[in-house]
Amino acid sequence: MDEAARQQMFRGHLILAPMTKGSNLPFRRLCVELGARFAVGEMALSRRVVRRAAGELALLRRHPDENIFGVQLCGRFPDVMARAAVLAQERGADFVDVNLGCPIDSVVRHGEGAALMTRPRRLTQILEAMRKVLTVGLSVKLRSGWTEDKPLAVSLAKLAQDAGADAVALHARSRTQRYRRPADWDLIGEVAAAVDIPVIGNGDIIRGKEAAERMRQTGCASVMTARGALVKPWLFREAAEDADVDLSGTERMDLLRRYVAMALEHFGEDERGRKKVRFFLDWHLDFFCRWVPSLEGAAPFHLQERHAGFEPRDDDEALLARTDLAAREYLVRLLVDGPEAAGEMPGPAPPGAPKAGRDHRKEITG
């Protein structure tokens, strides 16, 4: 693939972002069925990839239904990143992305993820080493900077371009902001104007129409969605149809059933596989339950807000909106193991009832 073709590949898309746990293969397949044509897998640690760790190599797997698929690598050593990139290319990736945005302490302490933004010389070495061994696309995904008051995105985008990257994806929040505060789309526009390679804007996309609007407003080549797709995976259908799509609770429940079917196919239907499916389904439900339909007269949904309760339109919508542990456990068992295993649906949660979430994951998935 020549340089022009590699860069063209990154233009004109709504892209499913790389997300640890989130962009697992079954979820990517669900998004493909809903209209996604471009997706990035879960972040893979380069040091584990080159050691051929089975769990890490699994993150490089591409499904035949995926149109454009990228592998995201995280690491700090140029030779290790280059070797891992070759393995990703050999397994069918259309491009390899370098993670410069992960804010998690356990990653940053290793000098990886967002920490690489503060080491431009090392970043240049990594990109040049990867460019030498790759014939497929090469991109970087970065944040606006380490702190909000010292933006690095423009200088890092220029550095990436000079070192051989074919595209830059910008999550327009700093490392210290994590996922708080609205994304800075003005900064995305500045970066798009500063470099010749495609710039992919990322942050707070929740409506399909927003993708085209943001590209037009900022000059970015494509738009990437992360949490928006987790809350509302039919976002890709909206983008394809250029229309808002309202799904009933029953239709949303059908999407979850479809996800579970693909997850069981991927992880296996034995108890070990089912345990993984319960874990991932519960993880996804932490986001899926946040969706509030934009009912007539209601304010539009925004990712940076936590909406108060609303009046569900059907029983499935009511169940999906619940965040108490008893309802979550019931829903996971119902979808993965069936009605008999799920038992009777719990009644309304009393005040102070335990909430579902990461603290209770083992209770639900064990």
Image (cartoon, rainbow, N blue to C red):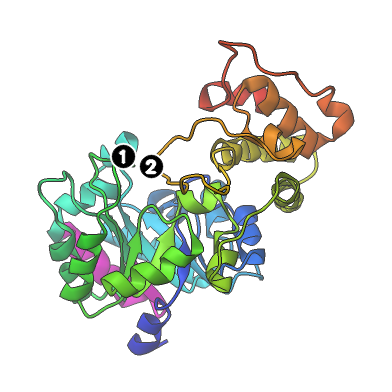
Find residue 272 and report its horizontal and vertical position in percent: 73, 36
Query: Which mark sits nearer the N-terminus, 2 or 1?
Result: 1
State yes or no: residue 97 in magenta.
no
> From this viewpoint, is residue 55 visible?
yes
Q: Secondary structure at mark 1?
A: loop
The span shown in magenta is: 122-139
Find residue 49 and report its horizontal and vertical position in percent: 46, 54
| Quadrant where the image shows the C terminus | top right
CB under 8 Å between discs 2 and 1? yes
- Read off the residue under disc 1: 180
Q: Residues within 10 Å of mark 1 (few under 14, many from 20)?
A: few
Find residue 226 and report its horizontal and vertical position in percent: 45, 53
Mark 2 vs mark 1, CA separation in Å = 7 Å
Where is residue 285, by image quadrant?
top right
Q: Nearer the viewer, residue 98 or 66?
A: 66
Q: Residue at 79% across / 34% down in the picture?
A: 334
Majority SS type along the magenta span: helix
Q: Is residue 51 left or right of residue 333?
A: left
> From this viewpoint, is residue 92 visible?
no
Labelled disc at residue 304: 2
Amino acid at circle 2: Gln
Amino acid at circle 1: Arg
Q: Residues within 10 Å of mark 2 (few under 14, many from 20)?
A: few
